[in-house]
Image (cartoon, rainbow, N blue to C red):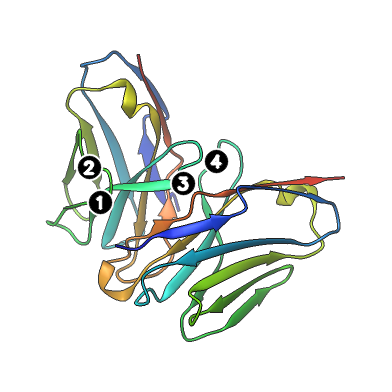
Amino acid sequence: GENVEQHPSTLSVQEGDSAVIKCTYSDSASNYFPWYKQELGKRPQLIIDIRSNVGEKKDQRIAVTLNKTAKHFSLHITETQPEDSAVYFCAASKTDSWGKFQFGAGTQVVVTP
Amino acid sequence: NAGVTQTPKFQVLKTGQSMTLQCAQDMNHNSMYWYRQDPGMGLRLIYYSASEGTTDKGEVPNGYNVSRLNKREFSLRLESAAPSQTSVYFCASSAQGPTEAFFGQGTRLTVV
């Protein structure tokens, strides 16, 4: 089955700097890659996603890149703010898996003022 | 629009007790899921239901059972709780196919 590895497990950045989280996946049939943000005590919520027919997607300060050949995808947060502090999860899914997701272990991001 | 609603939010059980976690969604989604979240391990799939009337095991199904009561509701049952089942449980739903999953607010379960 699919295996998703996520690095780093913790990331501390100064406010205004950029943060990058990387994930690798094992199943070349995976074609949907969402990123979820989970604030302390809250539910995971989608912040951005990318499908395998696209190499990059941006939404304001957040961007995701996908390298299908190398089977990895990354989340980029620019101009970080204290409210970006949270746990971020990457995930992978594919068309014939009925929407089942394999999640990475998560990255704790701490933005210090 | 409530989205995905789980009950209860918190529960403490003694070893060997049973309980059912309830989940309902109002987005007319076909697929529903139960995940457990443990520190450093991300979200692991317990069971899922691709559509009304079907359920399948996920990555960590042992000790759990599920029921897809109708299109809206998907319950998770612990028949004989064990301390290893102490976790935060999330229900989620999505439209058919690989697309965004919406999560409930979670149930924090402690088994003593």
Mark 4 chain: A
- Give residue B58's mark: 1
Mark 3 chain: B
Q: Which residue is mark 4?
A: A42
Q: Where residue A62 sits in the image (x, y, percent)?
A: 69, 67
How far apart are the two marked residues, 4 and 2, measured between alpha carbons? Answer: 24 Å
Q: Where residue B16 sits in the image (x, y, percent)?
A: 20, 16
Residues behind callouts 3 and 4 on a single chain: no
Question: In the image, A26: left or right of B59?
Answer: right
Question: In the image, A18: left or right of B52?
Answer: right
* Nearer to me, A31 or B100: A31
Residues behind callouts 4 and 2 on a single chain: no
Mark 1 chain: B
Q: Are marks 3 and 4 in contact (CB under 8 Å)?
A: no
Q: Where residue A83 sits in the image (x, y, percent)?
A: 74, 48
Q: Are marks 2 and 1 in contact (CB under 8 Å)?
A: yes
- Give residue B61's mark: 2
Residue neighbourhood size for the residue with mark 1, other residues' Cα within 10 Å, grouped as few (<14), some (14–19), many (≥20): some
How far apart are the two marked residues, 1 and 4, measured between alpha carbons? Answer: 23 Å
Q: Where residue A95 sits in the image (x, y, percent)?
A: 31, 75
Residue at image coords 46%, 46%: B42
* Amino acid type indicated by mark 3: Gly
What secondary structure is marked by label 4?
Answer: loop
Q: Which residue is mark 3?
A: B42
Q: Nearer the viewer, mark 1 or mark 4?
A: 1
Counting residues from the start of the chain, the first of labels 2 and 3 encountered is: 3
The image quarter in which residue A65 lies: bottom right
Residue neighbourhood size for the residue with mark 2, other residues' Cα within 10 Å, grouped as few (<14), some (14–19), many (≥20): some
Q: Spot the residue most to the front.
A: A70
* Amino acid type indicated by mark 4: Lys
